[in-house]
Image (cartoon, rainbow, N blue to C red):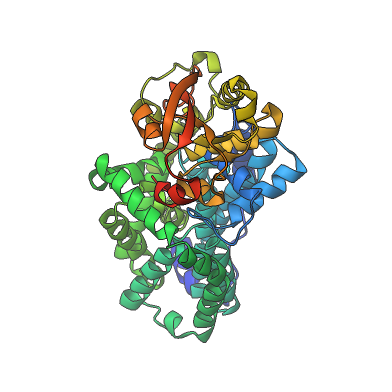
């Protein structure tokens, strides 16, 4: 009991040293997480979005229609250092995911958590089917989620120490995160609501907080200017996501899916953490964190956001739950915790892409593939490039001189763009997502090799349409690399420079 009271008093006592950091236990958990990810990052092929990041990285810009410039910049660096390397491209995702595991343990330490609490928090993060497994590929949510964890740690540490340099550091990380995606403002809004209700209201009066907000605004300005010049596509994409979520009952499934993403142990500690923040008097200085997930749930359910949008706040809440759980560390809790950790670990490993390709069954519909998009979104790219190249070579020689490729999907366009030189393809275009802003087909392209779409859709743009090929990769994504028709599209009805603005679409 004395140890519990001492831990409670130390939560906001800046003059009292923190408990020792559990280097051995947290290091072991982090090492195992890294090994699991390293064992999986070389499997299968590039995910469709990863090919898009590579393609975008070859066209560096201040912003993009569907994201900030950081992911393309990372992809560009890795593409230059190790071209066509799956492992190299994904290493940054592995590193930042493992770093988030360590920071989650550090948050538990900030709360006065013992070595056991720190290891438990790290284990919960590392066995989450979402928080860990997303680290096996380069993705915006991988980077965004980890940066949320870092910002949470800096804010929590400020509450304990009142060192304003931490708020400046949080602003700098926020500025970086704004170059990934625009979700982090919702985190700060939720923090402001929680602080206004429960305190410490002093946070909102700190000048450095608002200076930091100015830094974020200044560093985001170039992206905002780009977005304004292109009619705010990144904001319009939010409407596209909302429409997609609405078709699958997003509002009703949001909370169950969001909790499932945390895993068994993670969900237990997360919920226990929120309960602790509202019910335990010793946690009053951090009670504002209890409103954080509630505000985010309201916002993302109301806007039909994706269930993983709020996952960045899990690290802090898991840490609260882990500290409270181990403060009352009796035999019964030990008995419960061991199988929970073991089962959570098994589920996390099961979610990793480790199955042999021969054991993966093909699917025939996008709905089926969507249930395992992280698997089927990694197959069929070489088949797509090979069949497209064969169809291109089948065109009459005089048409090949000015022909270009137009792909229905930005995944298709990105794959063909990345493999363009290897397969001898002409310039690649697509009106889909951010790829549509990479350029317009030249008006002298009177023949287009069209990848995908129904014949009626292609005829809307060309007077002469014939089927000249087909892509049907066994494990491909239907409509992208499986059951895809290649069309010869000749005699454009209007010049591409006039048609293209109306063809652009974010869905």
* Relative to 222, residue 433 above or below: above
The x, y position of residue 93, in whole percent, is 60, 45
* Relative to 279, residue 171 above or below: below
Residue under the point 37% across and 77% down: 199
Residue 173 shows in the view: yes
The x, y position of residue 184, in whole percent, is 46, 63
* Relative to 446, residue 157 above or below: below
| The C terminus sits in image quarter | top left
| The N terminus sits in image quarter | bottom left
Q: Nearer the viewer, residue 332 or 239?
A: 239
Q: Is residue 218 left or right of residue 8?
A: right
Q: Nearer the viewer, residue 495 or 322?
A: 495
Q: Nearer the viewer, residue 246 or 212?
A: 246
Outermost residue, right side: 81
Residue under the point 59% across and 51% down: 71
Hey, which quadrant is residue 85 in on the image? top right
Residue under the point 59% across and 45% down: 53
Residue 120 shows in the view: no
């Amino acid at each position: 009991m004395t140890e519990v009271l001492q831990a409670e008093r130390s939560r906001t006592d800046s003059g009292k040293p923190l408990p020792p950091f559990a280097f051995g236990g947290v290091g072991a958990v982090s090492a195992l997480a890294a090994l699991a990810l390293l064992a999986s990052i070389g499997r299968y092929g590039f995910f469709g979005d990863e090919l898009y990041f590579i393609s975008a990285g070859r066209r560096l810009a201040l912003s993009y229609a569907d994201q900030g410039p950081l992911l393309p910049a990372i992809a560009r660096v890795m593409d230059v250092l190790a071209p066509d390397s799956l492992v190299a491209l994904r290493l940054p995702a592995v590193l930042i995911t493992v770093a988030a595991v360590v920071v989650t343990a550090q948050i538990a330490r900030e709360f006065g958590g013992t070595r056991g609490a720190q290891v438990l928090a790290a284990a919960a993060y590392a066995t989450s089917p979402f928080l860990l497994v997303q680290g096996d590929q380069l993705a915006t949510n991988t980077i965004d989620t980890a940066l949320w964890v870092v910002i949470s740690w800096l804010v929590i540490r400020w509450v304990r120490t009142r060192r304003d340099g931490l708020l400046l550091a949080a602003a700098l990380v926020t500025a970086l995160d704004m170059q990934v995606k625009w979700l982090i403002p919702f985190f700060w809004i939720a923090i402001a609501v929680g602080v206004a209700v429960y305190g410490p209201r002093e946070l909102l009066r700190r000048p450095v907080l608002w200076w930091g907000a100015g830094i974020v605004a200044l560093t985001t300005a170039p992206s905002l200017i780009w977005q304004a010049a292109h009619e705010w596509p990144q904001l319009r994409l939010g409407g596209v996501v909302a429409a997609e979520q609405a078709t699958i009952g997003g509002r009703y499934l949001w909370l169950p899916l969001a909790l499932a993403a945390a895993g068994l142990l993670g969900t237990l500690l997360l919920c226990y953490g929120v309960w602790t923040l509202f019910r335990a008097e010793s946690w009053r200085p951090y009670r504002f964190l209890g409103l954080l997930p509630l505000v985010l749930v309201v916002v993302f359910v109301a806007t039909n956001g994706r269930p993983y949008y709020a996952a960045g706040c899990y690290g802090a809440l898991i840490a609260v739950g882990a500290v409270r759980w181990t403060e009352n560390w009796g035999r019964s809790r030990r008995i419960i915790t061991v199988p929970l950790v073991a089962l959570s670990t098994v589920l996390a490993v099961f979610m990793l892409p480790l199955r042999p390709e021969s054991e993966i069954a093909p699917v025939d519909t996008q709905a089926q593939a969507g249930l395992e998009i992280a698997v089927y979104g990694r197959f069929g790219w070489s088949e797509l490039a090979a069949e497209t190249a064969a169809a291109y070579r089948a065109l009459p020689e005089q048409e090949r001189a000015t022909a270009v490729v137009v792909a229905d999907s930005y995944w298709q366009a990105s794959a063909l763009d990345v493999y363009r030189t290897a397969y001898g393809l002409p310039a690649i275009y697509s009106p889909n997502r951010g790829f549509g802003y990479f350029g317009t087909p030249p008006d002298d392209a009177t023949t287009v090799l069209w990848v995908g779409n129904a014949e009626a859709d292609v005829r809307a743009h060309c007077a002469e349409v014939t089927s000249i090929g087909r892509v049907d990769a066994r494990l491909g994504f239907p409509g992208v690399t499986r059951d895809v028709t290649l069309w010869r599209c000749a005699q454009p009805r209007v010049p591409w420079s006039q048609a293209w603005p109306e063809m652009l679409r974010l869905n």
